[in-house]
Amino acid sequence: MKPKSQAGFTLWELLVTVLVAGILLGLGVPSLQDAQRNNAISGAVNDLVTGLLAARAEAVKRRVPVTLCASPDPTAGNPVCTQTGAGANGGFIVWVDENGNVDANGTPILTDPTDGNAVVNPNETILMRQLPPPTMVPNGALQVFASNSGALVNSAYITFAANGFPIIPTPAGAPAMVNRILYCDDRGNKNGPGGANFSTARLVQIDQTGRAAVVSNRTDIANSLAQIPGAVCP
């Protein structure tokens, strides 16, 4: 009677299989981490652009100032704005920057010093609370920096008037309103998945009409770094 043969792997085949699996795992883990970081930056940028669009639209609809500012505690009962765009790491709030006073015709009265002052005062309605994006590990925490190109100072808010344009001049004693916000992690301003000169960092620029545009060009981001005080994007 012919003995039955048993199918299986030899020791060498098993070792080769383990080696190939290790190589594939070594290649796949960094790619997965990069994908997670790319998603984190893209998500944070999209949230900000959504907030800016909402603030602008609400200002036009309500005919009153509406402000978006960086905030380290957007879900607090009385959230505050940070005076530096890096202080909140992506968290922000949007609120009606007007105390609700109206005249006999129901038209908002905008003469109160607390109207459009970029400070959340009593009786002002908060429209949006956005938490900072989740921290990616290892070494993947997003850093957020903001500034105004004219004043070259840290700035972390923008107030839209009833016509949808940013309010200028800014409140007395407040920093100039932000018109660029940089999102960067430990990878810095390096080539991203989009091809040549497509950065892993992102820059949001707000023009004089209040419209926001997302910049991903490495050269443009590098040129803006010198105009954002304290920005670090290795």
Image (cartoon, rainbow, N blue to C red):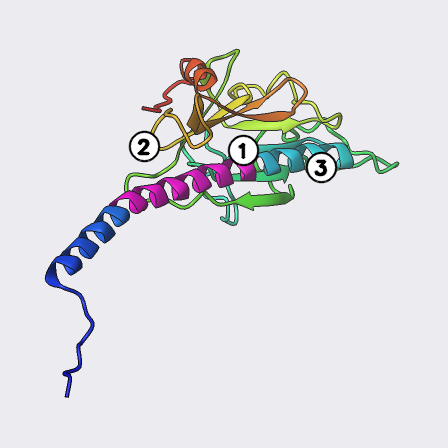
Marker disc for residue 69: 1
Query: Judging from the image, what secondary structure is the residue with disc 3 in?
Result: helix
> Residue 172: x, y in percent?
57, 19
For disc 1, the neighbor class at 10 Å (few under 14, some 14 to 19, many from 20) is: many
Residue range in magenta is 26-48
Q: Mark 2 points at which residue?
A: 186
Disc 2 is placed on an element classified as loop
Q: Residue 58 carries which label?
A: 3
| Camera sees residue 97 | no
Q: Which residue is drawn at 69% across and 23% down?
A: 165
The three-letter amino acid code for the residue at tag 2 is: Asp
* Residue pictured at 50% horizontal, 28% vertical: 156
Q: Residue furthest top?
A: 150
Q: Seen from this angle, which residue lies furthest left?
A: 11
Give the amino acid at mark 1: Cys
Q: Which residue is drawn at 28% across and 43% down?
A: 27
Q: Give residue 124's position: percent from left, percent from top.
A: 64, 41
Question: CA gap, disc 1 to disc 2?
Answer: 24 Å
The residue shown at (52%, 19%) is: 173
